[in-house]
Image (spheres, rainbow, N blue to C red):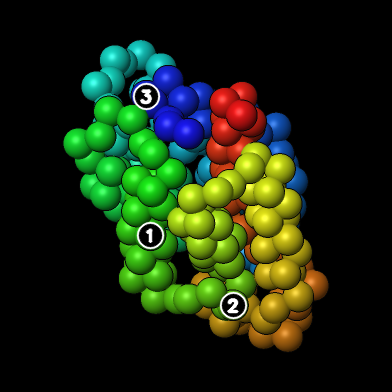
């Protein structure tokens, strides 16, 4: 399986639609353990990204991913903008020079994105951040044998697992044990992003 420019554009288009649709839900998740504006911020940034990539022609996927990264950095407030922006910027650098992305190339991009997330957020898996979703996604894609259903199932499992952990990073960490039982909003928006990727992959299966 290979993903070309149209597939990557479709990925972010699908992701934007999901974020817009679930904007209020994402903000509601953010209220008990954050600032309550995650959905609003992500919706604004994703809309900006789509407006940018839908009006340009690209030679390779990395250029699409880079433009998305820059839009998220510029338009998403709080910690999410720098985190998502860094992740996709690192991904774009890792896959630069490829006209299509094989699973192994995409896996390299995911590895770079995850390293960027860990460095930028000074966090790791198990600390109730979006890394709890990104890390298992990267591991799964690196196996080279993935399915759309498997991707969605794993992303959902990762999201549920993070719900039962205590936050030790970010604003949610102030709530300590009270954060247990709450879904991390960044993990939830990450779930929608990977659900969108799974839908693109499903079309190619």
Rendered location of residue 125, percent (x, y): 53, 74
Label 2–label 1 contact, CB within 8 A: no
Tell me if 160 is positioned left or right of 35 in this view: right
Residue 195 in which image quadrant:
top right
Residue 92 in which image quadrant:
top left
Label 3–label 1 contact, CB within 8 A: no
Give the alpha-carbon distance from disc 3 to disc 1, as whole Å. Answer: 20 Å
Give the alpha-carbon distance from disc 3 to disc 2, as whole Å. Answer: 33 Å
Rendered location of residue 131, percent (x, y): 52, 65
Task: Spot the residue most to the right.
Answer: 181
Label annotation for residue 157 = none
Crowd around label 2: few <14 · some 14–19 · many ≥20 (10 Å): some
Give above or below for 25 relative to 6: below
Reading the chain from its start, which is encountered first: label 3 or label 1?
A: 3
Q: At x 68% / y 49%, what residue is drawn?
A: 150
Q: Which residue is mark 2?
A: 126
Q: At x 51% / y 31%, what residue is drawn?
A: 11
Reading the chain from its start, which is encountered first: label 2 or label 1?
A: 1
Q: Which residue is mark 1?
A: 111
Rendered location of residue 178, percent (x, y): 75, 80
Q: Nearer the viewer, mark 3 or mark 2?
A: 3
Q: Quadrant of the C terminus?
A: top right
Q: Which residue is mark 3?
A: 5
Tell me if 48 is positioned left or right of 192 in this view: left
Secondary structure under the numbered disc 3 in the rendered image: helix
Tell which of 43 and 132 is nearer to you: 132
């Amino acid at each position: 399986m290979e993903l070309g420019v149209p597939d990557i554009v479709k990925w972010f288009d699908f992701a934007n639609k999901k974020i817009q649709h679930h904007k209020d839900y994402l903000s509601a998740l953010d209220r008990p353990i954050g600032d309550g504006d995650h959905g609003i911020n992500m919706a604004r940034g994703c809309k900006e990204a789509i407006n940018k990539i839908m009006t340009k022609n690209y030679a390779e996927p990395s250029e699409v991913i880079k433009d998305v990264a820059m839009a998220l950095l510029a338009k998403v407030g709080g910690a999410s903008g720098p985190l998502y922006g860094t992740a996709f910027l690192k991904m774009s650098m890792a896959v630069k020079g490829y006209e299509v992305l094989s699973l192994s190339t995409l896996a390299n991009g995911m590895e770079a994105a995850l390293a960027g997330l860990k460095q930028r957020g000074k966090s790791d898996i198990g600390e109730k951040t979006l890394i709890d979703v990104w890390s298992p996604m990267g591991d799964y894609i690196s196996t080279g044998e993935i399915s759309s259903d498997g991707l969605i199932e794993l992303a959902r499992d990762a999201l549920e697992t993070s719900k039962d952990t205590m936050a030790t990073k970010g604003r949610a960490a102030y709530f300590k044990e009270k954060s247990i039982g709450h879904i991390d909003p960044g993990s939830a928006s990450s779930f929608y992003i990977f659900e969108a990727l799974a839908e693109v992959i499903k079309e190619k299966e």
